[in-house]
Image (cartoon, rainbow, N blue to C red):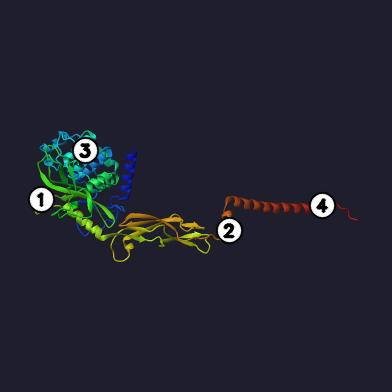
Amino acid sequence: MLKRIITFILAVSFVLAVPVGSGAEFMPDVEPKSDAVFMVNIDTDICVYQKNATKKEWPASITKIMAALVVLDTIKNLDEEVKISYDATDEFWTDDRNKRSPSNAALEPGQKGITFRDCLYALLIASACEAANILAINTAGSIEGFADMMNATAARLGCVNTHFSNAHGLYEPDNWSCAYDMYIITRYTYETYPEFARIISSTEHTFPANTANPQAYVKRNTNKLIQNTQGNEFYYEPAFGVKTGSFPEIYDTATGAVSEGVATLVSMAEKGGFTYILVTLGAPYHSPDDASEFAGYSFQDHIDLYNWAFGTLSYRTVISKDEIIASINVLQGENADQVQLKPATDFATLLPKVDGDDKSLLRLDVQKFEEEIVAPVKQGSPIGRLTVYLANEPIGVIDLVAAYDVERSQTAYAAEQAKRITQQPFFKALVAIIIFLIIAGIVVGQINRVKKAKARAAKRKSTPKY
């Protein structure tokens, strides 16, 4: 239960931090060939570029990131041995051309001494499809049950444009996702499980011997961004993971039609103290100039976008805590009828290099808690809120506080208190009573005077005259 609560909190934090459509969405100086892109600076939670981020696409083998997450969520001892049955490999020998000759780690049915950890390395480094099925069967009892677990985890993480039908990502019509959802899945897995972070950054892994390989053998990471080998034009030094995906063609089993395959890629790169996660989907598998070879468009898209981000975007302070942002009227102030407002802290963000003031890229929205306030006002007291917008999306909220003290004027205070008293119902009733009593006193006095005058007149009449 605790793990599910933590999962939910982290997932919600990712969704709130980098919602689709948020961030700067700066325009890179290159046009990616991938059909869908989502790129986030995870140090600032700013999406710097997106393209068709919620469009449903074929994820191919980056599906295996979710498979790894389900295993890591479920299996407590990764050094526990797995059972390798023919159920894990049978589908690769059927008539379905989409399942033929998949990438593998040469794991054999009946092989002993293979652990969950070995299979995770095979899954994420060699992109081994049999390893995906082995993990699925040993974790959930069946491939179908494991797919259900993958979908349940995706739903918990807030992925609304994702549905998995297998653990390996080979083409099936019901296996789809989007760039934004794959970002959520990757970031959560990376930040939750150190073992995942170790595996995806490994360039190779040694597997134990089996009947097909009498000696221990090595499988290299399929991610060319991290392979510093001779002749690899896609090596990119700042990159350190995550997962490749591709299939050269999509075969329609109903009609027999064949369409262009896709290449997908999730990677991470760090340079100058900043780290990015970049997801691309839907790059053409082949080059139009050579229909027989893998074009590598996904790798080139990542290199181009990283070069643009690292070379163009920088993190800098754009709002100073000493800067006056607004003012508010003060009642009963001593020699001041206003107080100025400034940010409680400095505010820094990721921005492209521009000529002139950085604020030309920003929009500031001031919200005052009240239209006016009453003295005394203490320096640093929160009085409002400043929302910073970049490309019409909020990227930060800062408290606005009083820039200095404003003491209360005793004279103004006394006058205000007197005014308040005179406006109270009890005071008005008291005044009415007093007026009534005064009027009553006047009337009674007048009546008494009349009575006395009559008494004197009567007395004069009754007195004898001599």
* Residue located at (28% from left, 64% from top): 354
Q: Residues within 10 Å of mark 3 (few under 14, many from 20)?
A: some
Q: Amino acid at mark 1?
A: Glu
Which residue is tagged 2? 414
Q: CA distance from mark 3 to mark 2?
A: 82 Å
Circle nearer the N terminus (1, 4): 1
Q: CA distance from mark 4 to mark 3?
A: 131 Å
Closer to the eye: label 3 or 1: 3
> Considering the numbered disc 2 on the image, is that residue within a helix, a strand or a loop?
helix
Pinpoint residue 8: horizontal percent, then vertical percent.
32, 42
**Which residue in the protein does label 4 denote?**
458
The amino acid type found where label 3 is placed reads Thr
Q: CA distance from mark 2 to mark 4?
A: 57 Å
Of mark 3 and mark 1, the one earlier in the sequence is 3
User: Which mark, residue 293?
Assistant: 1
Residue 364 sits in quarter? bottom left
